Image (spheres, rainbow, N blue to C red):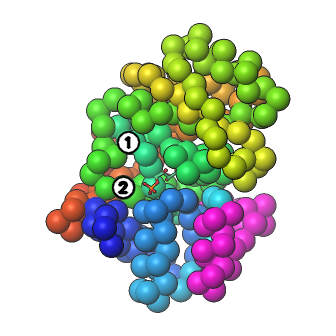
Amino acid sequence: MNHPGKHAAALAALEHVKLDTVLGVGTGSTVNVFIDALVADGTRIRGAVASSEATAEKLKAHGIDVLDLNMTGALELYIDGADEANPALQLIKGGGAALTREKIVAAASREFICIADKSKQVDVLGEFPLPVEVIPMARSFVAREIVRLGADPEYREAPRTDNGNIILDCYGFHITDPLTLEAALNAIPGVVTNGLFAARPADKLIIGYDDGRTETVLPPNA
Ligand code: 5RP
């Protein structure tokens, strides 16, 4: 494992998983370590709601039932990674293009635990380009609106998202008011959602260090 910080955070999340519950599972390399650790640990869960096709495939390959969120009701716990996290546990997510389903599962979960290595902790969000999922026919219009909001959008030359849409990666936002920017971006016609998790931040952030230590961070008002 060449990312000991991700590994440490993923392992520490295991103790929050309760037997026989339905778990929300995010997307990315840190979550992949978490899934492997969950299986190795032998923790029996009733099933999982996946935030992407990639995660669903990995869960199924491990013999874990992948359930439809429409059938499960609210989830007790969602575990996912992040690209950046600020001290209020507001996040940038979507580096893996799964932001829309991630936002849905996070919103449908009572607790959201974010797992990340130390490099993801920042004072102000925005160094990582903010992903915005866009309906393909609106790409140029939305890009112009994003320029008006002060950023430089770049069309991600990659396969479509799991929802059949495209991603604009927005460079140059210095996000001192994540709630306002999240709402402003989502108000542009053609935007499906953006990768700011401000209205629904994480409830806990488990930071993993390269020496194997972990730290659990709570939001300031917790
Ligand atoms: C995917 C995500 C991921 O959580 C984020 O990109 C972090 O990924 P990794 O754990 O590989 O660093 O938001 O859409």
Q: Which residue is mark 2?
A: 116
User: Which image quarter: residue 137?
Assistant: top right
Q: Position of residue 48 (x, y in %)?
A: 63, 72
Q: Which residue is mark 1?
A: 85
Q: Residue at x 55, y 45 (%)?
A: 94
| Quadrant position of the C terminus in the picture | top left
Work out whether residue 36 can be spotted: yes
User: Which image quarter: residue 6?
Assistant: bottom left
Q: Earlier in the sequence, mark 2 or mark 1?
A: 1
Q: Is residue 125 magenta?
A: no
Question: What label does residue 188 carry, if any?
Answer: none
Q: Amino acid at mark 1?
A: Ala
Q: Position of residue 39 (x, y in %)?
A: 49, 84
Image side of residue 93 versus residue 103, left or right: left
Q: Amino acid at mark 2?
A: Ala
Q: Residue furthest bottom?
A: 42
Q: Residue furthest front?
A: 157
Q: Is mark 1 within 8 Å of ligand 1?
A: no
Q: Residue at x 63, y 58 (%)?
A: 51
- Residue range corresponding to the magenta coloring: 53-75
Q: Residue furthest right?
A: 137
| Quadrant position of the N terminus in the picture | bottom left
Q: Residue at x 78, y 47 (%)?
A: 164
Instruction: Choose between 37 and 140: the one closer to the eye.
Output: 140
Q: Are marks 2 and 1 in contact (CB under 8 Å)?
A: yes
Q: Residue furthest top?
A: 148
